[in-house]
Image (cartoon, rainbow, N blue to C red):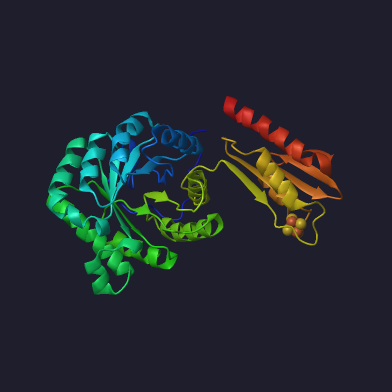
């Protein structure tokens, strides 16, 4: 009866200002959102929209597109109009594209203080245009492109240097009474990055966009991002995230969502509880876990499926899950909602689990 209890989180969110990014709320009153960035040429409107559609289907909340040339700027109105999720234009060097992006109907603009020296005399105009359009700006500081003056002062891209750069830029906008700002201070080293965000979180109430920049290929980038985001999100720091991977952006979205699900910051969908296997295993646990995962990919309803190699922890975990198998002697005991419903030969474990999962999903859908 009543609402199900919300799953436990490790800490309340740090209280921030609230932003509206094209209908997606960013700030402590809203769920942590997942962002990614297209890899197509932005000027290629069809290819970019196609990739945005794929990212949207994967669960991306906000998408960023690069805008390095006039052709890209010209493509922005069509992309902003047809995208199913808010589009943020990523601008370096050329202030004129900031105005173009705002005119194009983009939901936000990202600027990099290290690359916007030429913006100095334009901050007032940018603030006014963004305010009139009601869109936020992200101040995206990046260790690889820190302002030369700050670099000289700190010697390298220290956490303090990243934060000083970001807050300085934010103060320029604040002087023009513009506060719809979110900030990122990205670094490739998770330790430096975490420290920078901690400092930033203490010194302002702007929403924070988390990112480990140049995190690397999928495996390393996933580990670095999960570690760094986990350290921050577990203490309530972070309002929107982007996992950077040298891999197709859809992977970034999957990893980002998975990090949030792990911390109960998003409802979990399919969760496979599988054992690491050991000398007691009486079935091929890796193969079973992979096949069940593949068979249930894309499942939209929350479902915990336990795949366990033997009877030591098997029945306990399988009983605790929505669905599970505890294997032994070439057979699998199939559990549904805590009850053994049947015992099947090893060769039928996967198909039985998938059938039962589909049945449970259907029931949940109807319920
Ligand atoms: Fe080993 Fe059994 Fe535990 Fe799997 S469930 S790790 S096979 S003891």
- Horizontal arrangement in the rendering, residue 314 relative to residue 329 (left or right): left
Apparent side of residue 258 relative to residue 36 in the rendered image (left or right): right
Asked whether 230 or 125 is in front, the reply is: 125
Residue at the spot 36% in from the left edge and 49% down from the top edge:
239
Tell me if residue 299 comes above or below residue 310 in the rendering.
above
Front residue of 255 and 63? 63
The count of marks equals 0
The quarter of the displayed image where residue 149 is located = bottom left
Where residue 26 appears, x then y in whole percent? 33, 44
Outermost residue toward the top? 366
> What quarter of the picture does the C terminus occupy?
top right
**Residue 188 in sight in this render:** yes
Foreground residue, 201 or 221?
221
Q: Spot the residue most to the right.
A: 329
Q: Residue at x 80, y 49 (%)?
A: 327
- Left or right: residue 211 versus residue 22 is right
Task: Examine the rendered structure and indicate whether residue 49 appears above or below residue 8.
Answer: above
* Residue 118 placement (x, y as % from top left): 18, 54
Q: Nearer the viewer, residue 159 or 12?
A: 159
Image spot of residue 98 (x, y percent): 23, 44
Write the residue at 74% across / 41% down. Answer: 335
Displayed quadrant of residue 167? bottom left
Q: Position of residue 48 (x, y in %)?
A: 42, 37
**Quarter of the render that holds ligand 1:** bottom right
Q: Is residue 204 visible?
A: no
């Amino acid at each position: 009866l009543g609402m199900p209890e919300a799953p436990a989180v490790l800490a309340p969110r740090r209280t921030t200002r609230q932003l509206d990014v094209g209908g997606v709320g960013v700030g402590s009153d809203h769920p942590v959102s997942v962002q990614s960035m297209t890899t197509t040429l932005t000027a290629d409107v069809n290819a970019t929209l196609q990739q945005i559609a794929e990212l949207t289907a994967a669960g991306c909340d906000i998408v960023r597109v690069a805008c390095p040339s006039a052709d890209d700027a010209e493509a922005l109105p069509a992309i902003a109009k047809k995208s199913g999720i808010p589009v943020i234009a990523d601008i370096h060097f050329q202030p004129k594209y900031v105005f173009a992006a705002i005119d194009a109907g983009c939901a936000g603009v990202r600027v990099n203080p290290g690359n916007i020296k030429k913006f100095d005399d334009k901050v007032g105009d940018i603030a006014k245009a963004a305010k009139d359009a009601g869109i936020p700006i992200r101040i995206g500081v990046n260790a690889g492109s820190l302002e030369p003056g700050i670099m000289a002062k700190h010697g390298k891209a220290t956490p303090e240097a990243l934060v000083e750069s970001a807050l300085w830029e934010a103060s320029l906008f604040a002087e023009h009474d513009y506060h719809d700002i979110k900030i990122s201070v990205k670094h490739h080293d998770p330790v430096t990055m975490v420290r920078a965000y901690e400092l930033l979180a203490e010194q302002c109430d702007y929403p924070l966009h988390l990112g480990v920049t140049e995190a690397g290929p999928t495996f390393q980038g996933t580990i670095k991002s999960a570690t760094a985001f986990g350290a921050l999100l577990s203490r309530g720091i972070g309002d929107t995230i982007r996992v950077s991977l040298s891999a197709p952006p859809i992977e970034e979205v999957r990893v980002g969502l998975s990090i949030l699900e792990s911390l109960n910051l998003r409802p979990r969908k399919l969760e496979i509880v599988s054992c690491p296997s050991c000398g007691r295993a009486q079935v091929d646990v890796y193969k079973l876990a992979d096949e069940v995962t593949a068979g249930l990919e894309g499942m939209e309803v929350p479902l915990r499926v336990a795949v366990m190699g033997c009877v030591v922890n098997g029945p306990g975990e399988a009983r605790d899950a929505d669905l599970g198998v505890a294997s032994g002697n070439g057979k699998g005991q199939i559990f549904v909602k805590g009850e053994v419903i049947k015992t099947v030969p090893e060769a039928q474990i996967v198909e039985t689990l998938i059938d039962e999962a589909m049945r449970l999903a259907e029931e949940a859908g109807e319920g």
